[in-house]
Amino acid sequence: MVRFLSLSFLALVGAMVLVGCGSGAEETVVDPNDWRSEVDVIRMGAKGSEDDPATLRRWDALEALLIDVTGLPVKIYEASDYNGIIQAMASGQIEFSSMGAGSFANLYSQVGDAAIPVVVSTDSRGLRGYYSSVVVRADSEFQTLDDLKGKSLAFIDFNSTSGYIYPRFAMRAEGIDPDTHFGELAVAGGHSQGMLALANGQFDAVVLGVSGGSPELGFYTGALRRMAKREMVDLEDYREIWFAGPIANSPYVIRKDLPQALRDLIAGAMISLAFEEPEIFSDIGRIPGSTYSAVDLEFYREILDMQQLEIRQHRERFVKR
Amino acid sequence: MHRFLTGLTFVCCFLGVSHAADLRIGFVKSSHPEGCFQQNELSDEGAVAYAEHLAERFNSDLYMCFGEQAIASSDGTVKLIWGAREALAGFLDQYRPFLTPRRPDGLGRVPIVVFKKTSDPRGSIEQFRGTRLVLSDRDPKALNTDMPYDLLGDLGFGREDFETVWADGTMAVVQSVASGETDIGALELTSWARVCNAYISDHDHCSQLDVLVKSRPRAEHGMIIRNDSADEIRLRMVGVHARMHFENPQAFLWLVGPDAPELEPAEAEAFSIGLTE
């Protein structure tokens, strides 16, 4: 029924368009290839941010914009964890979503190029990366990863790029095997859960993502800074002792079975946000001075390779047992 | 709904007809012979690649109109025009900018914040001509030095109009103005936000500062689109052009040249920053 009504509506609109187009005998029939006849609704995935209660309001602003520019209903499905977004995209329940590079690597391993990265955040220096950090309490004696030998460390989520995949790779590159170096490993379930676990003394250190800067410049945001801004923690009570990166920024990923014109439109709307709709760009948590830019699969090659390596190592460990 | 109908009307007028509609793109200051040419009349392989790319994406018969005369005589049917800002100035009553190349070093047109001490009674940047300007001397110089000067140039100031003082990094720039050591400072927006949103209780420098100007520097080259084009068409054009360096490098190279790495959007005022104040 919905499809029938939308087609009827388009036919009516088409008739109105004939009047709107004015003269010209050749301008008489609406293009049958118009992409709106192929799409009823745009379903977008969004991962909630547990340390930021304004998340839903933020997605509402983007939802309204996409409704405006596409003329289609837009539904935003918020998932509480990384895997929810991955599986919804893989199974075709959503067509478009932001996700971490590691989540995209996981998705790619399931569906190949049926879903592709189209847009990524670019900072004011033209760079498209962020960092992992290892955070300890400021009153602890830990200054380096070596100091954490035999101690407890919380990662974030098996699908988290900055909170699991990349730092494990970077630690190994520095000669530290995270599976043997630390005395206890866990996954906290989210960046702010990890931060709270550190604050409560459950772990000696936690791995967190940080962005909007560099170890040399300092950073603009990340779970620690967001929670400090909300006065949930005091920034001065914590110390970042290790950084790894830059990590490829999180892409917006879109399913290729959407019409090309709609993919172009969504990409164009997202890339234009910082220039045309700076308030919405800010509302969805983007760093002032940054933009969205086009991105392709090759940009994520390093993460794709890391994820494959991680899977192989898991298998090898399983076989040895 | 009204906006949707209006947009769809334009879309259909622009593209959606029984056979493929014409899409005409103009190029000013081109070395190509003057006139409008259908895509199958083009000989340059890059031009053909560009024409075919857009014709396929917009289901249109593509015409390219080279030279101001050819564009002007097309009676408003040229939807997009590519060229330098100065060459496009005569068209800006009916067109607006929407695309511009990123710089060869990969930098875009980053917003610049020019600020003064709150207690300074001077309210406009013009009143600071001849005073002390503090900039960061950190790399990248193109971002921390050139772009602030570019914006000030757009606003009518030469480098000689200020006594430039160099500071070692963003915090030092802010502190210089807050302490009264210098009169105004200029920072790219991310650096400004990083300092002014610092979540440490004793970082209150920005509470003593007022923003005089926050703007991107003017774009010097790019593409303009007719003001009566639907938002949908403009945004699809952004989507197609912003990905062209990945999807069709030959077409991108022909349009943009070898120096710029990619195209990014431009706001409607991108060519006129500073010119209307």
Image (cartoon, coloured by chain):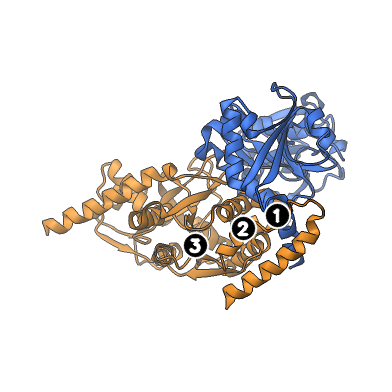
Quadrant of the rendered structure where residue B30 is?
top right
Quadrant of the rendered structure where residue B22 is?
top right
Q: Are marks 1 and 2 in contact (CB under 8 Å)?
A: yes
Residue A13 % position (x, y): 72, 66
Q: Type of residue at label 2?
A: Asp
What's the distance in space between the residues labelled 2 and 3, CA to CA? 19 Å
Quadrant where the image shows the C terminus of chain A: bottom left
Residue A131 % position (x, y): 45, 48
Residue B170 numbered tag: none
* Residue situated furthest front in the rendering: A25
- Callout 1 and callout 3 share a chain: no
The reply, left or right, for residue A316 in relation to residue A3 is left
Q: Which residue is mark 3?
A: A95
The reply, left or right, for residue A29 in relation to residue A77 is right
| Residue in front for this viewpoint, B184 or A10 | A10
Judged by depth in the image, the label closer to the viewer, 1 or 3, is 1
- Residue at screen point 80% across, 61% down: A19
What's the distance in space between the residues labelled 1 and 2, CA to CA? 9 Å
Q: What's the chain of the residue with tag 2?
A: A
Q: Which residue is mark 2?
A: A34
Colour blue, chain: B
Quadrant of the rendered structure where residue B47 is?
top right
Q: Which residue is mark 1?
A: B11
Indicate which disc, 2 or 3, sits on the residue closer to the N terminus: 2
Could you classify mark 2 by the number of other residues whose Cα lies within 10 Å: few (under 14), some (14-19), or many (20 or more)? some
